[in-house]
Image: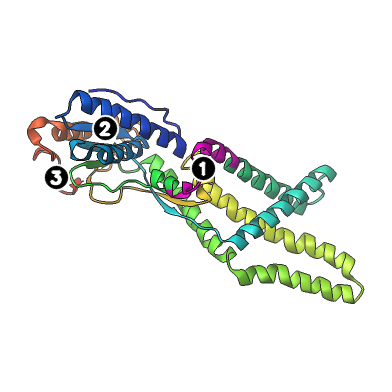
Amino acid sequence: MTRFAWSGRNSHRARMHATQDLVEHLQRQLTEHPRARQWVIAHSHGGNVALHAADQLRALRGRRARVTTVALATPFLHARPRTIPGWPLFIIVLFGAFLLASAAGTVMTGPRSLADTVLVAGGGAFAALIALCAAGAVLHRRSLGRGWRSRLVAAIHAPTARPGETIVIRAVGDEASGFLVAGQFVGWLSAVATRLLTSLWLWVAVIGLPQLAILVATVAGRGGRLAYGLLLHGFAPAGLLVVAVAAAMAGAAVVFGIDGPFAGLVVSCSAEPAPPGTATLLQLEPRTAATRKGLAHSSLYADDQVIRYIVSAVRPASGDEPSRDAPSGPDAET
């Protein structure tokens, strides 16, 4: 038995780097023990690392790579390509620049009303979003280039589980899973708002109607003050709406790592209780307050039922499948 340690940092880049290191580690183990079956027992996001490493190892060694992954309390990441059309992106950049300029001007002159305070807060949120995206771009700078979005999606999306090669063990009331679910809910709300904001007719109304009103007022000789009022009270709320949606998307992506907002520009990500494909699932029964020890997310380490199940699965006499002594019925489901 060997121990593989990685940084444990919550970022897509850290998990990608750990996957490569684990592949090299397993390669050495297979070279030293060519006929042995490798078992990788991993916790939390380590399960994503282990699943990717096992998948890459099979691609390198084919049938000679006999690896089974046991994932404890793992939030399996599912990723899909995200495409932002050109004109909504132009609108976001346009209103984002206007919002930043307006917020900077308000800070220099000093906020005088609640609207000014909201404007400054919106500008700060948009600036923070840009900073997070820039930080993610720096982390992934070496992988940027042609086809980088497809590579990023493949590196994040959990590989398809194969029967008998992936065991998922979960506890009821997992705190980390609850946090990710909350992030997914915010992401779902932002996705709904994004579909609304990508409506061409909405932005024709937002931009065209004020322009038409300014034109009419100019012809009537009252264009100056009306133009300023429409710019401040017409365009600014639209910019704040864009920033609110972008901030919600960034906030939902942050739970997947510091580079989540950057990846969120091209990848729609969610955390699920199981990987795609067929995996063996052991769902523990709820613990009472008297028997519960520590956090549900980390208590699996010391859970007797979990330990017995893993030992029975790894035991050579059991073959490739868990033995008959392993839990069955509602607790263990294939």
Count of numbered badges drawn on the protein: 3
Dominant SS in magenta: helix
Element under disc 1: loop
**Residue at image point 39% right, 27% down:** 6
Check disc 1 and report the residue beneath it. Answer: 144
Question: Would you say 304 lies left or right of 192 here?
Answer: left
Q: Amino acid at mark 2?
A: Ile
Crowding near pointer 2: few (<14 within 10 Å), some, many (20+)?
Answer: some
Q: Is residue 232 left or right of residue 329?
A: right
Residue 308's disc is: none
Residue plotted at (54% across, 58% down): 84
| 62 and 53: which is toward the camera | 62
Q: If the image is split into quadrants, where does the N terminus sit?
A: top left
Q: Is residue 91 magenta?
A: no
Measured Cα–Cα span from mark 3 to mark 1: 47 Å
- Depth order, front residue of 333/285: 333
Can I make out residue 11 in this image? Answer: no
Give the CA distance from mark 1 to mark 2. 32 Å
From which residue to which does the magenta span run?
134-150
Residue that label 2 marks: 41
Q: Earlier in the sequence, mark 1 or mark 2?
A: 2
Give the image location of residue 14, x and y in percent.
44, 34
Q: Amino acid at mark 1?
A: Leu
Check if residue 139 falls in the magenta segment: yes
Q: Quick one: label 2 or label 3, which is nearer the N terminus? A: 2
One can see residue 311 in this view: yes
Q: Amino acid at mark 3?
A: Ser
Residue labelled with disc 3: 328
Query: Does dot 3 land on a helix, a strand or a loop?
Result: loop
Q: Which picture quadrant has residue 204?
A: bottom right
